[in-house]
Image (cartoon, rainbow, N blue to C red):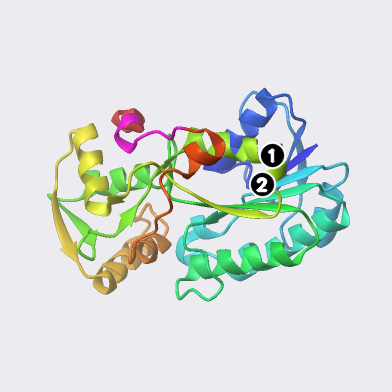
Amino acid sequence: MILVTGGTGFIGRALVRQLVTMGKPTRILLRPSKSSPSLPRGIPVEVAVASLQDERGIRAAMKGVQAVYHLAGAERASSRADFNSVDIEGTQSVAKAAADAGVERLVFLSHLGADKESAYTVLKAKGLAENAILQSRVPYTVLRTAPVYGPGDQFTVGLLKILKSSPGIFLLPGDGTSRIQPLWLDDLITCLTMVLGDVESVNQTYEIGGPEALTFREVMETIMSVTGIQRMLLPIAHVPLGRIALFLEQMGQFPLPLYWLEYLVVDHLCPADFLPRRFNILPARFHQKLGYLKS
């Protein structure tokens, strides 16, 4: 049995679908909620209901589990995110319960740049979460990923929403030269499923991204080229842009988590040849997979 936290999110739904297709018995950990969960449609999965703060519930969810994919995080909540209780304390609870249950592998999804000493909120939280896993007794694999894109993401779809609503201009964080390596969703899912059966991945931390180091300006130019929506790209300093974004977010008009503005302050890169060299995966180039934005 495989337990997936964050199984109703953008990456989690794709992972659960692939695990079930591969014939892997899969259980999703759902947090208690009054609203109906967005479970993968037509996919037979078990469900365990418990918050990441419910240690007893998490221990019960671990019954009969051989592997855990820990994808849950608070960043989608943007300015309302509680990184301490979800990403840090929640990961501590998951790692401890997995170790106590004799789980054979815990796969944790982190971010490029994760560091417990980071000045940036999300990256510090992910770094502290990684540290909690490393200190547990459970065999682990940490995947620090570049921004992941695909149908239903917050990254490209969120940028497109801003692009469509912008009156002739699009505000670029800083000078638009910070570089990222967008990673296609299917390539990440392939990597996630491959590490589980790979003994060389035990107790390893991998940094993975797409094959291209693109400036944020190049990312936006590619999205505009694919969708045919043209705007003037206007650089603006991070601090005033952050204030504008916070105001829009409070008005329900900013479709990206605010941490994105922190993430784009500096480059977040990894060796572009890692996936081909380590996992024999030839990752997709950014412009090749953006057809979903046209709809």
In the picture, the quarter occupied by the N terminus is top right
Q: Is residue 132 above or below residue 163?
A: below
Q: Which mark is residue 270?
A: none
Give the x, y percent position of residue 8.
61, 41
Quadrant housing residue 265: bottom left
Q: Is residue 283 magenta?
A: yes
Give the x, y percent position of residue 62.
83, 48
Quadrant housing residue 73: bottom right
Residue type highlighted by circle 1: Asp
Q: In the figure, is residue 153 to the left or right of 234?
A: right
* Residue at (53, 69) in percent of width and height: 115
Instruction: Give the SS element for disc 1.
Output: loop
Q: Is residue 264 magenta?
A: no
* Residue at (32, 28) in percent of width and height: 291
In terms of depth relative to the viewer, which is nearer, 241 or 127?
127
Q: In the figure, is residue 33 to the left or right of 213?
A: right
* Residue at (75, 57) in percent of width and height: 94
Report the label total: 2
* Residue at (36, 47) in percent of width and height: 158
Residue type highlighted by circle 2: Ser
Q: Which mark is residue 198?
A: 1
What span is colored magenta in the figure? 282-288
According to the picture, the residue beneath numbered tag 2 turns out to be 201
Give the x, y percent position of residue 49.
76, 47
